[in-house]
Image (spheres, helix red, strand yellow):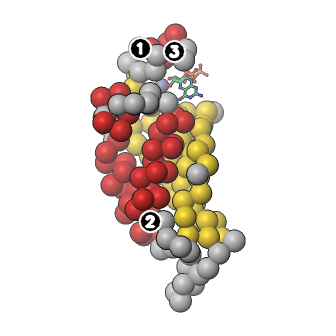
Amino acid sequence: MYELKVKTDFAAAHRLTLVGHKCENLHGHNWKVEVCIKGDGLDEGGVLMDFGVIKKSLRGIMEELDHKFLNELEMFSECPPSSENIARIIADKLGAAVNSDKARVYSVTAWESDNASATYIV
Ligand SMILES: Nc1nc2c(c(=O)[nH]1)N=C([C@H](O)[C@H](O)COP(=O)(O)OP(=O)(O)OP(=O)(O)O)CN2
Ligand SMILES: [Zn+2]
């Protein structure tokens, strides 16, 4: 089994009700995102999946999130923009773009600060 990891980031604002009192106020984070892709078979070039393919798809997803007020985005219309939901939505979008019978998105971790992260395992 091979495991690839690619990191990226985005900056955005959000509000979370029902979590902690201070989270109800509009505030922002510089989220760090780490995606993990797993699979068994390498292609003729000796790679599981070209990092460039993963980075390109992630760039598109980050553009949807970067410098946005997350609560107003369609993707968060039915779930609060917590780090857990951010990680899951990125995993779903990336998986739809890059999954194949050889390699699949395994997990996405969204770091809200240096000390706090949420991981979604597909
Ligand atoms: N499980 C989760 N818990 C919390 C989330 C989350 O997404 N998942 N989010 C928040 C808020 O976004 C809040 O902005 C961060 O709160 P918190 O870490 O408590 O505050 P600080 O960044 O200021 O960190 P301190 O350690 O308190 O300085 C809350 N919880
Ligand atoms: Zn927050």
Q: Is residue 91 left or right of 66 when viewed as pictured?
A: right
Q: Is residue 35 above or below residue 2?
A: above
Of pointers 3 and 2, the one earlier in the residue sequence: 3
Q: Is residue 24 above or below residue 110?
A: above
Horizontal and vertical percent position of residue 65: 35, 41
Q: Which residue is mark 1?
A: 25
Q: Residues within 10 Å of mark 1 (few under 14, many from 20)?
A: few
> Is label 3 in a helix, a strand or a loop?
loop
Residue 114 seen: no
Query: Where on the picture, by quarter, is residue 60?
Result: bottom left
Horizontal and vertical percent position of residue 113: 55, 33
* Discs 1/3, front: 3
Tell me if label 2 and label 1 are in contact, CB under 8 Å.
Answer: no
* Discs 2/1, front: 2
CA distance for labels 1 and 3? 12 Å
Mark sitting on residue 76: none
Q: Which residue is mark 2?
A: 98
Q: Amino acid at mark 1?
A: Asn
CA distance for labels 2 and 1? 36 Å
Q: Residue furthest bottom?
A: 44
CA distance for labels 3 and 2? 34 Å
Instruction: Kindly identify the residue that appears in the image at 49 percent across and 51 percent down.
Output: 91
Of pointers 2 and 1, the one earlier in the residue sequence: 1
Query: Where on the picture, by quarter, is residue 73?
Result: top left
Q: Residues within 10 Å of mark 2 (few under 14, many from 20)?
A: some
Q: Amino acid at mark 3?
A: Leu
Horizontal and vertical percent position of residue 79: 44, 30
Instruction: Kindly identify the residue that appears in the image at 41 percent across and 21 percent down.
Output: 15
Q: Which residue is mark 3?
A: 18
Q: Amino acid at mark 2?
A: Val
Tell me if label 1 and label 3 are in contact, CB under 8 Å.
Answer: no
Horizontal and vertical percent position of residue 105: 54, 59
